[in-house]
Amino acid sequence: MRDRLTDGLYGLGWSTVKKLPEPAAAALGRNIADIAWKRRGKSVLRLESNLARVVPDADPARLAELSKAGMRSYMRYWMESFRLPTWSADRVRDSVEIHDIDRLMDGIASGRGVILALPHLANWDLAGVYLTRALGVPFTTVAERLKPETLYDRFVAYRESLGMEVLPHAGGSAFGTLARRLRAGGLVCLVADRDLSANGVEVKYFGETARMPAGPAMLAQQTGALLLPATLWFGDAPMMYGRVHPAIDVPETGTRAEKTSSMTQALADAYATGIADHPEDWHMLQRLWLADLEPQEERT
């Protein structure tokens, strides 16, 4: 019953929100965010706990202010995403500004393949539509298998309608497909600041240990593709901004594991720069640092 309810609510969002006038949709998102923030549920408390690492000098009042802004940013992501299928290429182009986009475009033009890796900042779906519709650059990505399966199917169909090729995260075949796309000179985009496997690479993140996916670094080593970090942030609606950071090179020496660790730490450092600049746009409502994760035996 709960799964059917969840799927039904998302379905209602996709079918209804995109039909609302834009000011009404934005106001709805803010109201939902403020209600959730006032209820002080687990997700809001977790967001504040995560933000306390990012802004260690913040007092409780500042953290509450940041978490309220963070929930509004999170709901802005959803309101915009529900409406993205109705946005024209011109609308997308006029709403997004990416600094140092030439790093990405030059990499694609080189034919060596590009991995664009980013954290959960602002609206990564809008960034994807900017690539496919405004710049005409197709790409491949992966999606976490959600429950119920019908909800996962909705997400896949939604992102494919925006011009993305979507592979399931689970199952083990995604890595091989991504590698083939890169060897063919394609673009792979990965939201890669949260490890879903519990077998990720340990990194220092805002002074504490967290795990991040090894996939971007391993793909770059195996295929020779360019690895580019990117970060995003919201401006006044409808504007969103981003930055493509300098490429992360494969170290010349070290074992495969050592190279993967070094490259993943470099990704984490780039992410941290963007998150520290715009903490209210970091949509991390889950446990991330090892100190917050339950012991393995308690999670079985």
Image: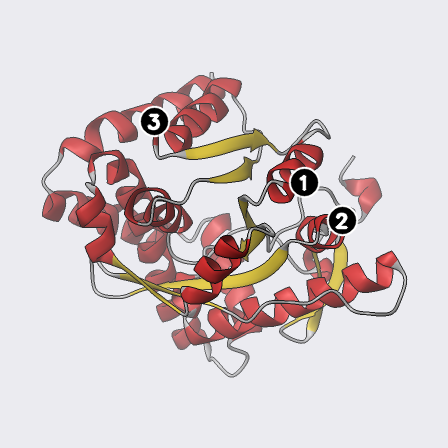
Circles 1 and 2: CB distance less than 8 Å? yes
Q: Is residue 4 left or right of residue 81?
A: right
Q: Position of residue 267 (x, y in %)?
A: 63, 65
Question: Which mark is in front, 3 or 2?
Answer: 2
Q: Which residue is mark 1?
A: 179
Q: Earlier in the sequence, mark 3 or mark 2?
A: 3
Circles 3 and 2: CB distance less than 8 Å? no
Whether residue 44 can be seen here: yes
Identify which amino acid the numbered label 2 is placed on.
Gln
Q: Quadrant of residue 234?
A: bottom left
Q: CA distance from mark 1 to mark 3?
A: 36 Å
Q: Position of residue 167 (x, y in %)?
A: 57, 30
Q: Which residue is mark 3?
A: 9
Q: Is residue 146 left or right of residue 210?
A: left
The numbered mark at residue 109 is none
Residue at the outermost bottom position: 57
Q: Is residue 164 left or right of residue 175?
A: left
Q: Position of residue 93 (x, y in %)?
A: 24, 53
Question: Residue drawn at (84%, 41%), measured in percent from left and top?
Answer: 297
